[in-house]
Amino acid sequence: MKIAVLDDWAGVAETMADWSRLKAEVTFFDQPLGDALVEAMQPFDVICLMRERTPFPRKVIEALPALRLIVTTGPRNLSIDVEAARARGIPVSGTRSRKTTTSELTLAMMLALSRRLIPEVGRLKGGGFQGQPGRDLAGLRLGLVGLGTIGAQMAEIGALLGMEVSAWSPNLTAERTEVLGVERAGSLVELAERSDVLSVHMVLSERSQGVVGAAAFEALPEGAIFLNTSRAGLVHREALFEGLRQRRPALAGIDVFETEPLPTSDAWRAALTEFGDRLLLTPHLGYVTEKTWQLFYQDTVEAIEAFVAGQPIRRL
C-alpha cells in the first residue's frame, strides 16, 4: 500500500503520529502540488488531506485509478466531492478536531490589536519605549457574525472580559441567543453599528459567500476592530481594503486567505505595506497547534488501519 500525506507545509506530519504502524510506504509532501496533483498522485492507494488545503473535486478523483481511500483532517471537508468518491466506492474518512484553537487565536488577535502589541514591540526593538496607549476591551461591544461552536466560545470570552456581546447570522434564533446570554441583532448592518469589535465565525457556503461587505464596514463605529479567523470567502476583500482606507474598520486581523499559501504577489501582502500596523495578518494559524495536529494525524493512522481491516470509520 502506498500512502500520500499532502500539504505538510511545516514538515512535521511524520513526527505527529506513529506511521510505522501501517507497515506501508508513506510519502509526505511539504509543498502544494497545484497543477501537478493528478500526475503526482497516480501511484497512491490512500491520500491524506490537511483540511481544505488541496481541493479534491470530481475531476481529480476520477483521474486517480489506484485511489482506494481518502482521509481528511477534521470532521468535514467541503473541498472534497464526497459523492464522486462514493460513486467509485472510495470511502472518505475524517478525524476529530480540537474545539478551542480558533477562538484562542481570535482572542490573541483581538488583544494584540486593541493593546497595540505589534507596534509597541517594534518601538522597543527600535530603541524607543512607550508610544500611544492601547484600548481597554472591558466595556466595549463584541459583535459576532455567527454563533456556532466558535462563536459561542467567543461570546463566553467576551463576557469574561467584560464586553457586551451581540450576534447575527441568517438563521440565528432568539432561543440560541437567550441560552448564551447574547443580544440578537436584526441584521448584519445593525450588528456592525454597535460593534467595537466585529468577528466572523460562519461556515462558508454559496449563501454566505461575501456576506461581510461594504455596508457592514461603513456601519462600524470609530476605532472598531474587524477580525476574520473563519474563511476568506465570507468577506469582500476589496470592501475591507476600502474600509481600512476610510478607517472603518480602524484595525483588522486576518488569518485566512483566498489562496494559501499566500503568493508573494498577493494583494494581501501589498495591503501590509499600505496599512502598516493597522493590519495584522497571520498565516492561517487557527488550527495550527501541536495537540491539534497530533489528534489529526493519529486519527488519520487509525482511519487507515480501520480501512485495511474492512471497517472504515468516521465517514464523511
Image (cartoon, rainbow, N blue to C red):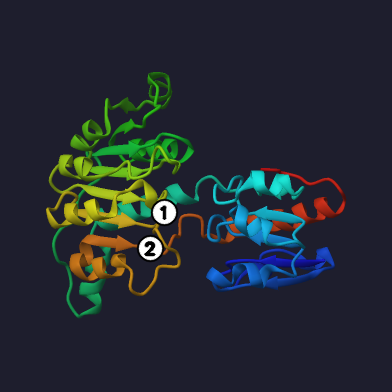
Quadrant for residue 133, please give it. Answer: bottom left
How many tags in the picture? 2
Q: In the figure, 188 relative to 115: above or below? A: above
Q: Is 32 on the left or on the right of 245, as rendered?
A: right
- Number of residues whose C-alpha sits closer than 10 Å to that of mark 2, classed few (under 14), some (14–19) or many (20 or more): some
- Residue 4 in the image, given as x and y percentages of width and height: 70, 67
- Which of labels 1 and 2 is toward the front? 2
- Disc 2 target residue: 282
Residue that appears at 67% across and 61% down: 63
**Position in image of residue 245 (x %, y %):** 14, 57
Residue at the spot 33% in from the left edge and 45% down from the top edge = 210
Visible residue check, residue 9: no
> Which secondary structure lies at badge 2?
loop
Check disc 1 and give the amino acid type.
Leu
Say which mark, if any, is on residue 281: none
Residue that mark 1 sits on? 105
Residues at circles 1 and 2 in contact by the CB criterion of under 8 Å: yes
Whichever of callouts 1 and 2 sits on the residue coming sooner in the sequence is: 1
